[in-house]
Image: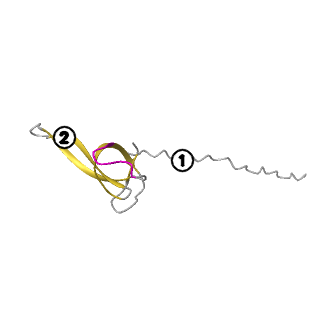
Amino acid sequence: MAEKKKTTKKATPKKVEHKQKEVIRKKFHGVVVSDKMDKTVVVRVDRVVVHPKYKKRYTVSKKYKCHDEKNEFKEGDKVTFTECRPMSKNKRWRVIK
């Protein structure tokens, strides 16, 4: 009998395109309360909450330490800030506008 030679095809690796995940970052608007630290401002964010039982509306505020690279924002300025990598123990936000 005639022997058949086995031909094997080499598998060509497919090009895999890795897409970077689009990071969704939180954004807040607030008022600068303090600008006494170097490259850092403290921003107060106010929000209105409705009490679940009594339906009364009241204001709740929270303060965030935000990175201000050029020290351009002063007390009383309205700013927008977003999440970023941790820059210190409490500073995880960066001022945009």
Say how many tags the image has. 2
Q: Residue at x 61, y 46 (%)?
A: 17
* SS assignment at label 2: strand
Q: Nearer the viewer, residue 10 or 69?
A: 69
* SS assignment at label 1: loop
Of marks 1 and 2, which one's residue comes earlier in the chain? Answer: 1
What amino acid type is highlighted by mark number 1? Gln
Q: Position of residue 12 (x, y in %)?
A: 73, 49
Q: Nearer the viewer, mark 1 or mark 2?
A: 2
How busy is the neighbourhood of tag 1: few (under 14 within 10 Å), some, or many (20 plus)?
A: few
Q: Position of residue 72 (x, y in %)?
A: 39, 49
Q: Position of residue 23 (x, y in %)?
A: 45, 46
Q: In the shown orientation, is residue 6 left or right of residue 76?
A: right
Q: Main secondary structure of the magenta part?
A: loop
Q: Nearer the viewer, residue 24 or 74?
A: 74
The residue beneath circle 2 is: 49
What amino acid type is highlighted by mark number 2? Val
Q: Position of residue 19 (x, y in %)?
A: 56, 45
The residue beneath circle 1 is: 20
Residue 53 appears in which quarter of the rendering? top left
Q: Nearer the viewer, residue 36 or 62?
A: 36
Q: Which stretch is magenta? A: 71-78
Q: In the shown orientation, is residue 87 left or right of residue 58?
A: right
